[in-house]
Amino acid sequence: MTLQPLLDELLAEPRERMEARAAGEFDRIAAPFENRVVLFGAAYLGKLALAGLRAAGVEPLAFCDNNSTLWETKVEGVSVVSPATAAARYRDNAAFVTTTYNPALPRHQLRELGCGRVAPYPALFWKFWRFMPNEDRLELPHRILERASEMGPAYAMLSDEKSRRELCAQIRWRCLLDSNCLPQPDPSQDMYFPTDLWSMSPGEVFVDCGAFDGDSIRGFIQRTGGRFGRIHAVEADAANVRALRRYCADLPADVSARITVLPYAVGKVDGTARFRAGEFEGSKVAHTGAALKVECRSLDSALDRERPTFIKMDIEGAELDALLGAAKTMARCRPVMAVCAYHKCDHLWIIPKLLKAANPDYRIFLRRYAEDCWETVYYAVPPERSM
């Protein structure tokens, strides 16, 4: 699969038919129980689906989840039961929606339990997108293809065939929900730390933008065996910062002493940013609907006296501004970059351009660590560090 033939195929579908197909996909799967819905997965994605359904006037019948500690409890006022219980109650009179980031196993599990109407979360989004303003990682097919002319330059910047196949598969999946076109994801433990693109150095200076509770730092320390120069952990959510500091305090003293926690958001310029906090992994900079204000720094400003060798960005959609605010650092220090590309659909074709604009020497790679479109990361590797 190469990009231009794929775009020619997708654009051959008339727009009106494309819009009707997307709008009707969920009903096609769920009929005749379009308004009788069980959500498989009671975590972040399930809560987004719940909010959208409620805004549309549809109250889910239940959550089901493989986490047994949630059974017979309620999440956001909705009862949580086991998949077996949900199937026994609802398989003949409801539709199930897989609200997990790896939906293949839940889909298979439901079908083994006799559930015939199993819809993917993106099909629910396609129907109820007007009621899901906080879900900006997905988009309607016709809106994606309105920007087809922007995709070619990004495709041409990719440095290996695996990346080019992934980009094409992502575009096809986002327009058709054709899971068969997607390559198998890479192992989740390799996210941010692939073993085939560059090697860690003993003096690595790691800047973790979106440090959360230290989950990526754990992976970094494991990969380096504790042999690194310094870690700058950047996190704006106050609850996450507290968890991050607790994690760092529990590390061996010689490791903890080399970690600096920077409690602010990352952006294009120094200042303040509106921030939506208290959503754990969903905490993020939000230009509307967020009353909280936090300090915001550009990496060019925050790191002007540092020489970072590796920068990771998982900042819930703020990646473009953060890259613009790190352009001088990328040119000056030539760090390896690991930048999440799934928080907004158009980041798939915008992020490579920003990386190359900052440092034309970068080799660009695209990798995915979950099913569908989730956990997708661009890497920029300077030639002197390439394997």
Image: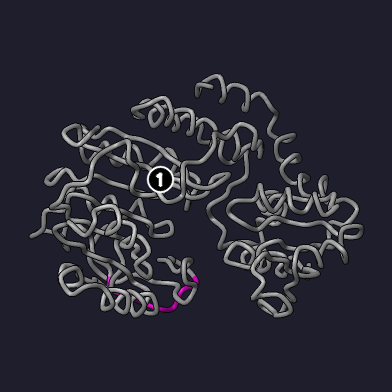
**What residue is shown at x 62% (from left), y 27% (from top)?**
11
Residue 80 locus on image (x, y percent) = 72, 73
In the displayed structure, 346 sits above or below 3; it is: below
**Which quarter of the figure is the N terminus placed in?**
top right
Q: Which structural element holds mark 1? A: strand
Residue nearest the viewer, comparing 135 with 254: 254
**Badge 1 is on which residue?**
377
Q: Residue at 58% across / 62% down in the picture?
A: 133
Percent across and percent down for residue 365 are 36, 35
Q: Amino acid at mark 1?
A: Val
Residue 50 falls in image quadrant? bottom right
Q: Quadrant of residue 155?
A: top left
* Range covered by the magenta-colored residues: 289-295
Would you place residue 266 above or below residue 189 in this image? below
Quarter of the image for the C terminus: give it. Answer: top left
Outermost residue, left side:
305
**Quarter of the rendering containing residue 20:** top right
The front one of 238 and 266 is 238
Label 1: how many Cα within 10 Å (few below 14, some 14–19, many 20+):
many
Residue, x 38% and y 59% (percent of image)?
Answer: 315
Where is residue 355 shown, x and y percent of the image?
28, 41
